[in-house]
């Protein structure tokens, strides 16, 4: 090579873009549905309990604080004449629901679901057989007056023989700062009771998701609630005009020492560290 010839250096290697972590690729709404909800079991319970209380089959359902409206979609999938309404304040989660859930239904079933963006205190729809406030969502009402106003609104949206269903958790662990973990195939769900004020009853909780590659979604969901007790809830339901309320307590499997998912009506229960119950308020 002559001295006048120009030499060309090889271009530097391109830097590889870091591969997105499992947390980067995760969908928090999907993770919530997989970790927290069992819509089939919930609809089974509501269907069975309504028929036992009212002697007929429920056809129309309203899901307050519906989020992804998972229960609405399960409800209309059960019977061809079932109707469902979901109510939530957050437009983004309703948009997600329409894209990922409504589109997955058969057209005939999809037409029987209505999603309303609005406040559960004022959102009105045709009166329904059953109205649900699940996943402790109504605990965002922190005073007795606010809670009573919501219960009055719920009663107003029920048919003459309608039933209002709520869930509740408690036990002495409910008043502690703690973390609980459950591992699934794709992720670990972390329930974080971050703070509790015994003077006001206010509790702050988070849901985190951890992944096997070491990544995580911290505080994917945060809840600023009041921790209500069963006696308080039943008293406020009575003040709101409901004729009576029934508590359904979850049993335990003696072989596994775990909850068995079988909820039965009762007026007496054990002082467990942690328990889950349903309330049916009869109009």
Image: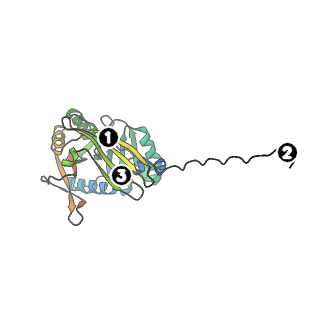
Relative horizontal placement of residue 70, taking residue 196 as reference (left or right)? right
Q: How is the image coloured?
A: rainbow
Q: How many marks?
A: 3
Which of the two labelled residues, at mark 2 and mark 3, occupies the earlier sequence position? Answer: 2
Residue sitting at 21 percent across and 48 percent down? 173
Label 1 sits on a secondary structure element that is: strand
- Name the foreground residue: 25 vs 139: 25
Residue 261, compared with residue 231, is above or below; it is below
Say which residue label 3 marks.
189
Determine whether, in the image, residue 195 is placed left or right of residue 208: left
Rendering coords of residue 243 (x, y %):
16, 44
Q: Secondary structure at mark 2?
A: loop
Residue 67 falls left or right of residue 173: right
Q: What whole-number distance in Å separates the C-alpha atoms at marks 2 and 1?
A: 71 Å
Is there a contact, CB below 8 Å, between mark 2 and mark 3? no
Q: Earlier in the sequence, mark 3 or mark 1?
A: 3
Question: How far is the residue under mark 2 from the one under mark 3?
Answer: 65 Å
List x then y, in percent, for residue 67.
37, 44
Q: Earlier in the sequence, mark 2 or mark 1?
A: 2
**Few, some or many C-alpha atoms within 10 Å of disc 1 (few <14, some 14-19, many ≥20)?**
some
List the residue tagged with mark 2: 5
Camera-side residue: 50 or 224?
A: 224
Report the disc number at residue 223.
1
């Amino acid at each position: 090579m002559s001295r006048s010839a120009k030499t060309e250096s090889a271009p530097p290697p391109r830097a590889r873009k870091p591969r997105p972590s499992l947390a980067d690729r995760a969908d928090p709404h999907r993770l919530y549905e997989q970790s927290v909800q069992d819509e089939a079991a919930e609809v089974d319970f509501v269907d069975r309990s309504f028929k036992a209380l009212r002697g007929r089959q429920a056809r129309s359902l309203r899901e307050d604080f519906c989020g992804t409206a998972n229960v609405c979609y399960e409800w209309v999938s059960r019977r061809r004449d079932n109707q469902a309404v979901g109510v939530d304040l957050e437009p983004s989660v309703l948009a997600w629901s329409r894209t990922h859930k409504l589109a997955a239904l058969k057209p005939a079933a999809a037409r029987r679901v209505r999603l309303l963006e609005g406040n559960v205190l004022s959102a009105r729809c045709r009166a329904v057989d059953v109205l649900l406030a699940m996943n402790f969502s109504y605990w965002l009402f922190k005073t007795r007056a606010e809670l009573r106003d919501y219960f009055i609104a719920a009663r107003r949206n029920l048919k003459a023989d309608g039933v209002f269903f709520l869930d509740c958790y408690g036990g002495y662990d409910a008043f502690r700062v703690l973390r609980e973990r459950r591992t699934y195939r794709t992720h670990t769900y972390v329930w974080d009771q971050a703070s509790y004020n015994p003077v006001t009853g206010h509790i702050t909780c988070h849901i985190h998701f951890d992944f096997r590659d070491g990544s995580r979604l911290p505080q994917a969901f945060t809840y600023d609630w009041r921790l209500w007790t069963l006696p308080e809830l039943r008293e406020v339901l009575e003040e709101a005009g409901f004729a009576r309320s029934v508590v359904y307590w979850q049993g335990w499997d003696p072989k596994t020492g775990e909850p068995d998912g079988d909820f039965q009506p009762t007026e007496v229960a054990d002082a467990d560290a942690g328990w889950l119950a349903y309330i049916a308020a009869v109009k």
